[in-house]
Amino acid sequence: MMDPKKFRELCVSMLILASALIIAFAPDAYLPMLLRAFIVPASVGAFVVALLSVIRRKWWVAQSALLGGAIMLMQVQMPPARDAGTSASSGLRIFHMNVLQPNTAFQEAIAQALASDADLISVQEVGPEWAVELEQGLKGRYPYAHIEPRTNCYGIALFSRVPFAEACTITMDGAPFIEALVDVGGRPVRLLAVHATSPISYGHFRRRNAQLERLGEYLAQGDTATIVVGDLNTVPWDRAYQCFCVRAGLRSTTPALQRTWPSIGPFALIPLDHVLVSAGVWSSALSTVDIPGSDHRGLVADLSF
């Protein structure tokens, strides 16, 4: 008869390994998608459990946690869009921030945007108050703007010190996205500021996927150099994200260690905010910055052409 302590350890080991396998390989449905979004923190947690189990000489638990963490981490694929051999003829700096609509740290967030010295600034969760504050705070250095305030946390704005050849709002399943055309070094570049629906319910999950699918089909119709920036409410290892990139002909610039939400001081858990680029556009640098009062970290992207 097995020792009760050993039996409990075996049960814990099986539970850890089964959980890791479910997170890594479950079908691409709503609940597994939510779990897989946190696969990197879950992997780190499994490795910590493995280390503690070795210290306590719980060998079965240690092996299961180590194997489970490795299996989960193997699912994370985030190839950066970089090419050291490309000689850039021109460049563009983009600053992106999701300000969190109830946030009232207007001046602090605007100061962070100004400090980025970006050519274009993408802002999300722009309510009526934010629209007024942003316009007043940025118009001196960013005279070109397209603002679509909303009261439902899906307002959006784009500010530029480069003139817009065109700028308009496109609506995808109820969400306003901004499309702008700018001149960079004598070539047209299309930029889209996007805030996809947060998958807080199954219905929202389906809406987010529909938005990304429609946007991918829309972007595939043109051959202009394209940049998509925003809170896509998905992670690079999510099937919806990968299908969107393939459909639109875009590449992810998300580094393996980039995390933007939820922001806890200088840290965050998962990458929800992204910069994606088409052929001929390369990411020379991408970093995250603190956005005062927000639950997201911001992005500063240096792109070359």
Image (spheres, rainbow, N blue to C red):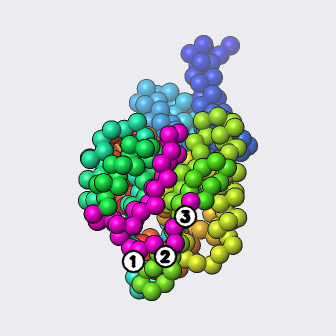
User: Label 2, label 1: how many angstroms apart (C-alpha)?
Assistant: 18 Å
In what quadrant of the picture does the N terminus appear?
top right
Number of residues whose C-alpha sits closer than 10 Å to that of mark 3, classed few (under 14), some (14–19) or many (20 or more)? some
Q: Which residue is mark 3?
A: 168
Inspect the image, locate mark 2, and give the three-letter code of the amino acid beneath it: Ala
Inspect the image, locate mark 1, and give the three-letter code of the amino acid beneath it: Gly
Which residue is at the front of the view, 137 or 63?
Answer: 137
Residue 88 belongs to the span the image colors magenta: no
Q: Is residue 179 visible?
A: yes
Q: Which residue is mark 2?
A: 165
> Residue at position x 40%, y 49% from top?
131
Q: Which residues are magenta?
A: 140-169
Residue 158 belongs to the span the image colors magenta: yes
> Residue at position x 39%, y 77% from top?
91
Number of the front mark, 2 or 1: 2
Inspect the image, locate mark 3, and give the three-letter code of the amino acid beneath it: Cys
- In which image quadrant can residue 302 be found? bottom left
Q: Earlier in the sequence, mark 1 or mark 3?
A: 1
Q: Which residue is mark 1?
A: 91
Residue 29 is left or right of residue 178, and the answer is right
